[in-house]
Image (cartoon, grey):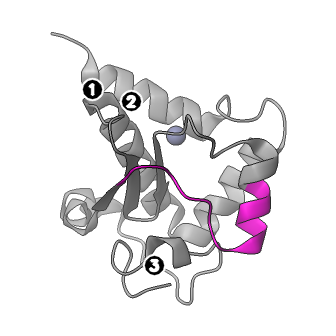
Amino acid sequence: MGGRNGEGDYRSWSATPARKQKRRRSHWYSTCRDVRIFVLNSIPLPTDPGLKQLVEETELITDKTSGITFGHGIVLKNGAIDRRLVAHELVHVMQYEKFGGIEAFLKEYVKEVAFPPGYPHGPLEREAAQVADRVCQKP
Ligand SMILES: [Zn+2]
């Protein structure tokens, strides 16, 4: 963990952070200031061995992956960024907040991707997709 979420080297983020984040459910708007977006040419695999194995086995990160979120940090693939993608990843930030931090969220998310129906058909991914669709609907 390199400092606060969204700062430092995002690849050092782990499923077991050194400290837990505070729950701030009722302060969603204030936490938006904490969101950091990294734009890279590809989404790298995590350095944490357990997470790396998970993303490889579930194909959670492939050449087609356009974004991924860890806590308040969002990594987006250069050239694949659009409003729907940003909205989708911001929903994941909100989900991390609701769960109270990276560890709690990833415990649930790992279950979602590791067991049927698998990625991207579990409730967390469905919520992100549905909210992004709603946000991006034309009036
Ligand atoms: Zn997602």
The answer to whether 48 appears left or right of 130 in the picture is right
Name the residue rendered at 64%, 61% in the picture: 106
**Disc nearer the start of the sequence (3/1):** 3
Disc 3: CA contacts within 10 A as few (<14), some (14-19) or many (>=20): some
Residue at 32% x, 21% y is: 134
In the image, residue 50 lies at what x, y percent? 78, 69
Residue 27 is tagged as none
Instruction: Identify residue type, mark 3.
Output: Gln
Number of callouts? 3
Q: Is residue 48 magenta?
A: yes
Tag shown at residue 21: 3
CB-based contact (under 8 Å), mark 1 and mark 2: yes
Q: Earlier along the polypeptide chain: callout 3 or callout 2?
A: 3
Instruction: Please identify the quarter of the rendering in which residue 93 is found.
Output: bottom left
Q: SS class of the residue under badge 3?
A: loop
Q: Circle 1 is placed at which residue position?
A: 135
Toward the left, the furthest residue is 139
User: Tag 1: residue type?
Assistant: Val
Disc 1 and disc 2: Cα gap in Å? 6 Å
Is there a contact, CB below 8 Å, between mark 3 and mark 2?
no
43 above or below 1? above
Q: Nearer the viewer, residue 55 or 138?
A: 55
The front one of 20 and 70 is 70
Residue type, mark 2 in image: Val
Residue 66 in picture, x, y percent from top left: 46, 39
Q: Examine the image and state in which quarter residue 12 appears.
A: bottom right
The mark found on residue 131 in the picture is: 2
Query: Which residues are drawn in magenta?
Result: 40-54
